[in-house]
Amino acid sequence: MPNTDRTEPSQKNPNKINAGRFFENFTLNEVIQHATPRTISAGDAALNIALTGARNPLHCSEPFAQSLGYATAPIDDLLAFHIAFGKTVPDISVNAVANLGYADVRFMQPVFVGDTLSTSSTVIGLKQNSSGKNGVVYVRSTSVNQHNQPVLSWVRWVMVHKKDLDAPAPETVIPELPAFVSAANLSIPHSFSAESFNATATGGKYFWEDYQAGERINHSAGMIINDSDHSLATRLYQNNARLHFENLYIPNLQVNTMDAVAEKIGKRLVYGGVVISTCRALSFGGLENALTILAINAGAHANPCFAGDTIYSYTEVLDRWELPNRNDAGALRLRMVGIKNATPAEISELKPQNSYHPNVVLDLDYTVLMPRKGNV
Amino acid sequence: MPNTDRTEPSQKNPNKINAGRFFENFTLNEVIQHATPRTISAGDAALNIALTGARNPLHCSEPFAQSLGYATAPIDDLLAFHIAFGKTVPDISVNAVANLGYADVRFMQPVFVGDTLSTSSTVIGLKQNSSGKNGVVYVRSTSVNQHNQPVLSWVRWVMVHKKDLDAPAPETVIPELPAFVSAANLSIPHSFSAESFNATATGGKYFWEDYQAGERINHSAGMIINDSDHSLATRLYQNNARLHFENLYIPNLQVNTMDAVAEKIGKRLVYGGVVISTCRALSFGGLENALTILAINAGAHANPCFAGDTIYSYTEVLDRWELPNRNDAGALRLRMVGIKNATPAEISELKPQNSYHPNVVLDLDYTVLMPRKGNV
Amino acid sequence: MPNTDRTEPSQKNPNKINAGRFFENFTLNEVIQHATPRTISAGDAALNIALTGARNPLHCSEPFAQSLGYATAPIDDLLAFHIAFGKTVPDISVNAVANLGYADVRFMQPVFVGDTLSTSSTVIGLKQNSSGKNGVVYVRSTSVNQHNQPVLSWVRWVMVHKKDLDAPAPETVIPELPAFVSAANLSIPHSFSAESFNATATGGKYFWEDYQAGERINHSAGMIINDSDHSLATRLYQNNARLHFENLYIPNLQVNTMDAVAEKIGKRLVYGGVVISTCRALSFGGLENALTILAINAGAHANPCFAGDTIYSYTEVLDRWELPNRNDAGALRLRMVGIKNATPAEISELKPQNSYHPNVVLDLDYTVLMPRKGNV
């Protein structure tokens, strides 16, 4: 099947097929409104459980959520993120060579069944590569609910093909990005209180004070990702990146840090968000009281994941922060490492020769909210 | 495994297993009430997205639906059709040799979460075949909601086995069927208005006036259908036709025009409705503003589809109609062609030697509602 | 991959991973509150249809449920059971050698969308085996709704490893268990009435009086269980038993009567609950009016089931009971036999040489509620 058929749809259907933006089509400070606003439903939440096996009661028990001050059970943080993110794909990354990175991912408001998420992106940086064939685009994307309140905000940068190689290079602008979202910038849901936290509901025995920086937790459970599992999830997120649905032959594909594909493939790549959600669900055993995600500081999809892979994970505790003006809960900065086809015990060094161990599929730096012992 | 085990269940369990109607059991003008009324839920709508990847905001964004005059987001037209259709299978087509065709499929009312659909069929035609072994049954099926309002109505005809070969042939009655549902017979939801249509929500740049009869759109995306994908969908529709769930060995199976199987198979046939919904979702890229289906004029499942097939599609614009007394929106009559394991660019002739190209799986003639440019 | 990695997670992560209870950790009369209370949603109900193909209108038609006196459609009895059961796995059976049996499973209240189920277990029996390496634990588990009303209650017994072989054997206590739930102990939903039962909705022609003890019904339909099907279902139930999600190599695994695995396996075992729900859905053809499950009297997973197996079933009528003070409906005690890769007609003897036929996967003794003819 000739590759040209897939890379040049716009030439064959000049009028109707949106071929997506190429590097020269992005302008600094441009705001892009993404299509398909999405109302979150009870069906999305149930599918998230069926797809991940998530057992965090915050997202599946209304009384438990209410005991923490929520109006009702919010949906899984990562489900909201994947749905919001999916909307940016047709405009931002459909012609991407590589997804290079994430930064400053903030979870600003809980999302409830009935909320409608709309996502937009602002171009905050541009840098044409020295080859002149492509360039790096930095966007800050924000998803708002039906009250126009921001619920999620994140920066990502992607390498995008130029189509018109004669188009002039834009001025290089590289945004300054934080290494991590600081404690002061974390958004705790305003009605949240862990004063009545019921550890029976989570089954967790360990609290914020019990986790020490440097500690490693090898989560025992693993999970095989089936073909339909990742297809269903990626479609649920309305992420239409073609390499998740077709066995694309991708020549000259380069290694990158997010959605990396290390070699030419003739099979479907599992969407990186599926790997993140799988690892998060597997890590429940050992992090039962990590109630909600406050931030993703950085992330790398170290190696590609395909259907049939068995995913395991381990967590390193990076840091432990008090939160301003509260002693019912604190923040933990964690490193969640996803592994394919090997157990955590078999991975002693993450980067044995300065590059990722071939069985490592995810290296995610994120921050969670956890009740403190003193108040329980 | 002896085939008789499957074709004669009624002989082994004379009292309790409903073997379904054979040709001699159908009577002209008979009305058949089908079992299992079905209340549509938010779970059905979410599963429809997970199964198809549909991105049409009309079915997943409450505010967008409300901006068009709907009380809330209606469910996907085809989801409603497949659910309504599934109910007819045990009574109409369980002993069918072949599903021969569809006509005059009308989408009469939007269906919302909470609506309960009940389906009945009237026998409107009968013709015993010259062999005396089977005959063609024509039924008009109608699905009503809990207010007894018709929401869907369609004609199909199937070839059904006779069980008692000595049963006398009925009088031959062949109903007159329209080649397509005319503009005057299309039902626009009575509160619908495209005056406030927001093209940002669909991402579509093209309107009713932009589509020209004869124009062809090669949709770029493809999708592999996994085993669980089609099994989940067909079960969700409560369509219990056995060839979708068991690896039946079907001797002497004949080519037909709907749910066609070209050869003896030892694997499960993907339900034709799954192919239709997949193609409709893939065709969003290029038909973003085709908001809702008003009619299916005719359809053929040109070749069988099995799990593992990659589905692509293209659309030909057949006609463009003004709608009576309105200038906010018009109708487009489209031909949606589904292809397996080849891209649209590889299919130049639909019927190279007077029969369908072996990679073509669907040839569907349908009519959609699209906003007009003038009012946007 | 060394097996020790899986059997001794607690040694490697002494502080944070809950390795679950070993035999010596159970104490007679101890009450264990299980984690993850679960609010049932419309998404769960839709997924149950997509996963099983269930066509019983009681669980998918609000008007039909209301015509029988329910406030709205209750969720499928077995969906409620599997969700409630899943919560007990981390505390009761994570270190189980074998699930030995079930008894006295009572369905005490219908469960509706919006209900939150919380499950607890009481240790009602203990018996260390003569080897001193493991023992049998009997628990009565009860699931209550948000009003603290019991909705489900059941006894099961599992063989669990000892970790500390020097721990003293507890006093042997073996609870007395009923062979079946008697008619007097069945809970009919208090507002239930079959006086307005509409057989058109079920499509069933046979009523309580029509079924005779000793009668056998060979259900004609079969269903292949796909990898994703059982993975999705087991995750939806939040049942995290590892052998359903990883290709565990399990040495010295013994044959047992529930979740039996006859040999060392290198593939995932389909959760027994998936087999039960599949058989129940397949048995709709012939038991259309078996509206709801009142009890499970006993059950054996006779042989393991793996993805790719085609499941068939037959039903034997064991008994027919009048219900106290009512003549609108009665109870039927049924034996539902699940078969893999063979049709019911091929299984004449359930236990040809005193052990289960190798194609038999399920032998379930249960009791259903069915309308009586007199009142319809």
Image: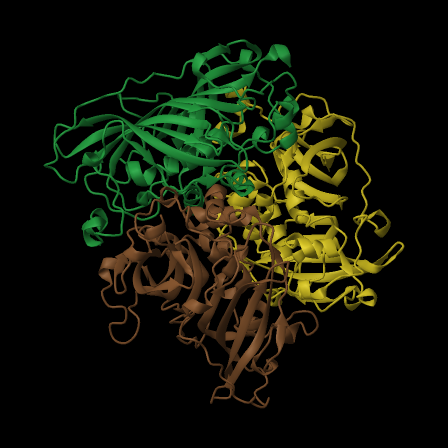
Chain colours: A brown, B yellow, C green
Task: Name the one closer to the observer, B106 or B375.
Answer: B375
> With A349 as the anchor, is A68 left or right in this view?
right
Residue A69, given in percent of the width and then of the height, sits at 49, 49
Q: Which one is nearer the viewer's eye here, A186 or B330?
A: A186
Residue depicted at x 37% and y 66%: A365
| Residue plotted at (38% across, 38% down) | C86
- Tell me residue B150's x, y (percent): 76, 38
Q: Which residue shows up at 80% across the image and 37% down it?
A: B175
Along the horizontal axis of the image, is C294 left or right of C133?
A: right
Where residue C273 sits: x, y (%)? 40, 34
Q: Is residue C43 visible?
A: yes
Rendering coords of residue A306 (x, y %):
40, 60
Outermost right residue: B325
Q: Can residue A88 be seen here?
A: no
Question: Which quadrant would residue B353 be assigned to in this image?
Answer: bottom right
Which image quadrant for residue A270? Answer: bottom left
Q: Quadrant of residue A293?
A: bottom left
Q: Is residue B82 above or below residue B192?
A: above
- The residue positioned 45% from the left and 72% from the top of the image is A103
